[in-house]
Amino acid sequence: MPLVCLGLSHQTAPVDVRERHVFPASRMGEALSALRDYQAVREAAMLSTCGRLEIYAELEDYEAGVDQLKSFLHNFRHGDVTHDMSSYLYTLLGSQAIDHFFAVATGLDSMLIGEAEILGQVKDAYVQAQKARSLGKTLHALFREVIAAGKEARSQTRIGGESVSVATAAIDLARRRLGDLSALSVLVVGAGKMGTTAAKRLRLEGCRELLVANRSQRRAHDVVAELGRGRAIALPSIVEAMKQADIVVTSTGASHFVLGPGNVAEAMLARPSRPLFIIDIAVPRDVDPDVARLPNVTLADIDALKGIVESTLERRRDAIPMVEEIIAEHTERFAQWYQARAALPVVAALAQKAESIRETELQRLFARCPELSERERMLVTGASLRIISKLLHSVVTRIRERATSNRAEALTLAQVLDELFDLRVRADGGHAERHPVHELKLDE
């Protein structure tokens, strides 16, 4: 069964395409449940961020499965789509998909190398897939290795060094365009993770006035309290706030434009000679692109940040070889497990049958010999366990070794065992039911 990655990212699609295909968190469970209904899709998980939308899946058949994944994406489109999505999609198969996922989780494939948010987003994707029961053993094992590699990359290398994120890059862009920010008034629209990060960076820049607007004004108050400065305002008050602001940074997660030509033009009437710089780091975008046509208004979206942080990323680039070594180690470990899994159902069935026979015969023996003391029963039980263990050890070891070196030979051996011991298990594991797997502790 092939393992694939189907998706689009900042590498292949501009922001106006990516925003049309964002899956809101509120719809992720629904989407993953729908994916389970596609016949050729055995397991699936989705990673949806401002920079990418990717589906990782194990398929029954490559061609049929990829076609079904594409059909799923088309069926779940929302909003008016004027672009041919297929022209932006990439499909990675087998080791390419695996290598790519490791590069994503460790930050090597991010728009900003080593960005801090991506590992948390991978963990969220894992949790969402578990809740939707769309994960099986294969993707569970892959996520486990990918998350472990991401943690090691951050703790053992400088790939996450130097504070750089989309939000901080936005502030760097403002400083490059406008110079010293200490005399300027800044409005941050959105008090989520990126908005909060931007506000913290603005506090360090010492801007003259900092306003935080959010749909939940309580959340805006919390951010201001955490910063120890600034003022929280209600979202409907942003037009009044824009009349005084020099810079607006938006990141709300709304599914519609928060700022358009109408409300921005209204604000500009009160300040016709003062320029306004708007940085939109949301996907989907918060600001209608037509706002850029207004006099004295400059608009930059998330794609404008790609070239902003070259100098601060040099140390991170130096860490890439070390991160690649970590990836290679975890990739090899997953590959060995993935190859060996072909024999696991037969090995498990053989062990289960041996244990069933051992338990039945022990019960029969103890029933015939009631005079045995508790210690004697324990000695007999221990001896029976050792016999089974020693008898099966070489068989289990050899078939696992074959599975990692020669999958075809391992499948043949598994089939022979299946027939000789009447285990009635398909050598390839069959079409296993989707069961929830034990969760990886994400706070380790």
Image (spheres, helix red, strand yellow):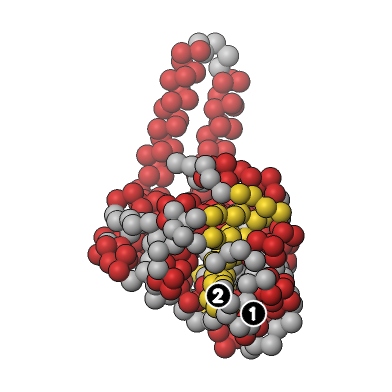
Q: Which residue is mark 1?
A: 291
Where residue 403 sits in the image (x, y, percent)? Answer: 40, 61
**Residue 360 vertical placement versus 185 (above, below):** above
Q: Nearer the viewer, residue 47 or 303?
A: 303
Using the image as rendered, state which of residue 132 and residue 444 is in the foreground.
444
Q: Residues within 10 Å of mark 1 (few under 14, many from 20)?
A: some
- The residue positioned 39% from the left and 76% from the top of the image is 307
Residue 413 screen position, x and y as percent: 43, 62
Image-quadrant location for residue 391: top left
Type of amino acid under label 2: Pro
Dot 2 crowding, Cα within 10 Å, few <14, some 14–19, many 20+: some
Q: Residue at x 38, y 44 (%)?
A: 393
Q: Secondary structure at mark 1?
A: helix
> Is the residue under label 2 in contact with that under label 1 (CB below 8 Å)?
no
**Residue 393 left/right relative to 15:** left
Could one spot residue 369 in this view of the protein? yes
Which residue bears the numbered disc 2? 275
Name the residue rendered at 62%, 60% in the picture. Answer: 189
Q: Earlier in the sequence, mark 1 or mark 2?
A: 2
The label shown at residue 37 is: none
